[in-house]
Amino acid sequence: MKKYFITYLLLCSALVWAQDKPKPALTWKEVASWKAIPAFGGTQLSSDGAWFAYVLNPNEGDAEIIIRKTSDTTKIKYPIGSSTSFSMSFSEDAKWFAFKVYAKDKDKKAAAKPGGKPVPDKVFLINLSNKKKTEFERVRTFAFNGEKSSVLALHLTPATTPTGPNADGPKGSDLLLYDLAGGKTQNIGNISEYSFNKQGDWLALTVDAAEKAGNGLWVRNMNTNVVMILDNDKASYKSLNWTEKGDGLALLKGTKDEKYKTELNSVVGVKNFSTMPELSIYEPKKDSTAFPKGMTISANRTPYWSEDLGRLFFGITKTELAKKETTKADAKKDTTKKESSDAEKLAKIKADTSIKTIDDLTKAIAKVKTDSTKKVAATPDADKEKPDMTIWHWQDKRLQSRQQVQETQDKNFSFIANYDVNNKKFLRLADSSLKNLSIAPKQLYGIGQDIANYELDNNLDGQNYSDIYVVDLKTGKRSKVMEKHYIPDFYANPSPSPDGTKFLYWKDGNWIVFDLTTQTSRNISDKAGTSFIDIEDDHNVRKPPYPVIGWTNDSRLILVSDGWDIWQLSVDGSASAKNLTKNGKAEQLRYQNRYVLDPEEKGIDLSKTQYFKTYGEWTKKSGFVALENGQVKNLLWEDTSVGSLNKAKKADAFVYTRQTFKTSPEYYLSTSTSLENGQKITQNTPSFEKYAWSPSVRLIDYKGDKGDKLQGALFLPAGYEEGKKYPTIVYYYEKLSQTLHSFANPGYSGTGWSPSVYTSNGYAVFIPDIVYKLNDPGMSAVWCVIPGVKAALKTGVIDETKIGIHGHSWGGYQTSFLITQTNMFKAAAAGAPLTDMISMYNLIYKNSGTSNGAIFEASQGRLLPPWENWEAYNRNSPLYHVKKVNTPLLMLHNDADGAVDFTQGIEYYNALRRLKKPVVLIQYKGENHGLAKLPNRKDYAVRMMEFFDYHLKGKPAPEWLEKGVDRLTLDEHLDKRAMSAEE
């Protein structure tokens, strides 16, 4: 008995010891296998709310999908291979679930090697009633047949991919139609595109076979399984597009003409599906009167029907002549021509009676050759070499670099036009004098924007202007209704009403409604009693508005924001402006985005409950409210970050997310319209419990040196002990205190930064806000960050002798500048920093091809032009204060950076090196503004932490940091690092 008692005590002691044993920090090696639900495209809710599917995807390796019942704990799990995006779908009746299975990570890596073969995707179909799985091989895409939910269509990848001369051959491959009830499969060959209408009772198919034999448009009645061939031709059929109601189909038909580079297209429309499908085809080549010469219907704009099925809308573009290639017939002609020419030469010599001697014969032959050479020289040589060059002209409206970036877009541009099916009339709606035309709902009017007169200035200073036109879509009549309209931000653009008869726009601090039928304007916000100007926007633009919430579905009201509350404005002025939420500004509570729970809605239906997200500006709390019958009801309000509210299509089942800095985002389901009793239905980040995490976060209130009220988030290190001070990393990028309750998923970011990995490894992390003053972007960081750090030091958490700073891009600029103004920080890491504001102003933003000048004057730079402001540019340039730097700096800057030119990093590095300041520059070949390749992301994440560990924790310096690495030993160094990472 005594023996058992002692054993019992030992077991109890072991359990207590196991419970008290601290959890290990998450290492960079273990980050590779960390799984989490992707932020986008990783979840799906069935239409009845009974099932929820989500993906757990690792940073490196293979993902898995979990399909679970929302009413109990039933779960089905499947490995789905390696991918960055995921394809999955519930059938509309919620009885079936289909998803793609990708090649495993190891198989993809093997396929990427020389001689490797890619592994095609599969699709698994799950019968949710009995969990039976059916597999399909080599699937390119799949789709259920809409509301009918009777068939799963699977478009297969060809067994062999055409290469060489046949690479541009037929696009068709097998399409499987799997009968969900009977389990039988039908194979239809040579299908290039397929599409079900919304109801799922019609399937449109385009056939693209070898030699175009049998190419055509087919439609299949899914109720009777009868297939109708609506059109047959030696042509390509493409761009299938059903109307939203599913009662009309539009597509393109392309025929080859050897004279042109691309196919000449016609537009095809089909309607009257309720009786007998009726086909209409508009062929430009048969309309020599109305259709413009030298143009064709564009393949780069999907055609569509007007809502009344009376007109087809499509794009038109210029045709391009094909370059003449030498054919056998041409070669034969050349041979015949040469033979004829030789015969002519011989005849000419024979006919020359002056030839008496051998010398005379030699001279005659030479003369014939000379004459022949002169004729050849007179013929233009198409194969002559041309210079490879670009002409940059001061009057170019777009920089040549911008034109290069947009070259494909420019080539693919098309002017919108329509075809009246009943009256058989083509109408061009846009042309070179009005290129950009947006079609308003109901297709009665178009709203055009012409920037031609302002494009050069827009590209120089970033201030956007446009002439606004109204186009009658039935007559083509065009009216200029606004000249040089100023557009300070996205929300200032014209926004059409659901009935298509009006549009909302912003002018000089007010919301204006323009009536398209009468072409008159009405100011609807001037008497609201509040301002809708975004006074918190510190960019150099004039009176930008807060966001538009949207039009109501009856086109009578518009909901807008004043930054705090939601306001209702009357379109016709019959009612006063109304504050729907009332307490936002008074309580410093922001009513933010409205959740669109019905993706098919046409405007806001105020007769139905509307849901909004709320956010406490200074508390950082968040929640949901419901707006119903003009009254606001609080549904959720807590010290977390909530969001992603969605509703099941056919049931009152609401799914939303909840997260904090120390708990990953989880999905909750409520069957109450008040979102009560939400039940957690996911298990995100399954490895979470294995590791040590930050125990909590503190909100720091402080004032900037210029009097601004600011906040910062201080995340405590794992294992935090009250009274103990910790090494700290300060991170920033404009305003980020709102991330107080945001979980930072461990990962290999493109910048090396992962705050949760740092807190797990014993660092505190402090994230302060920065607000900006015009002409002082660098000094603004000084005025905001340093007071924030001083306020955070008062908590006793931060070791004032072990503070590091890090930022990337604009944050990298702040880092590079801060170390010229203070010695508060012991180490700094700057990614892709701007360092010389003067040279940076005139460099090219290569990713877009635009000049940085516009970004400086109207966007993030927050500066006036340098020639009006030299002192401000010097004052805010890290390079001009480089002598004052005493902080060791690690820089990341890549040679292919298309946002901040590599020379910016080199300028700063060379200046620091010249002054013998401790600086290390890490460059990854061919990488852009952030690291894209996984090996590079992993490598830099480790190196940046090694850098901070050395300076802030006193760990031994790695050799690359202490001595550098010679070029001849770099491969050996990288091999050792790779081997060490695998161990």
Image (cartoon, rainbow, N blue to C red):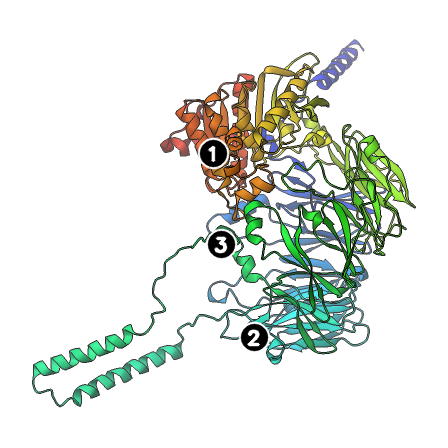
User: Helix, strand or loop at disc 3?
Assistant: loop
**Residue 179 percent across, percent down from the top left:** 76, 63
- Give the mark nearest the N terminus, 2 or 1: 2
Residue that mark 3 sits on: 395
**Residue 941 percent across, percent down from the top left:** 55, 31
- Which residue occupies the foreground of this view, 132 or 423? 423
Q: Which marked residue is nearer to the observer: mark 2 or mark 3?
A: 3
User: Helix, strand or loop at disc 2?
Assistant: loop
- Which residue occupies the foreground of this view, 68 or 489? 489
**Residue 132 percent across, percent down from the top left:** 76, 52
Q: CA distance from mark 1 to mark 3?
A: 31 Å
Q: Which mark is residue 118?
A: none
Residue that mark 1 sits on: 905
- Give the mark nearest the N terminus, 1 or 3: 3
Q: Quadrant of the N terminus?
A: top right
The quadrant in which residue 451 appears is bottom right
User: Helix, strand or loop at disc 1?
Assistant: helix
Count the labels in the image: 3
Disc 2 marks a residue whose amino acid type is: Lys
Residue that mark 2 sits on: 293
On screen, residue 414 above or below 663: below
**Residue 18 percent across, percent down from the top left:** 71, 19
Residue 980 in view of the camera: no
The quadrant in which residue 180 appears is bottom right
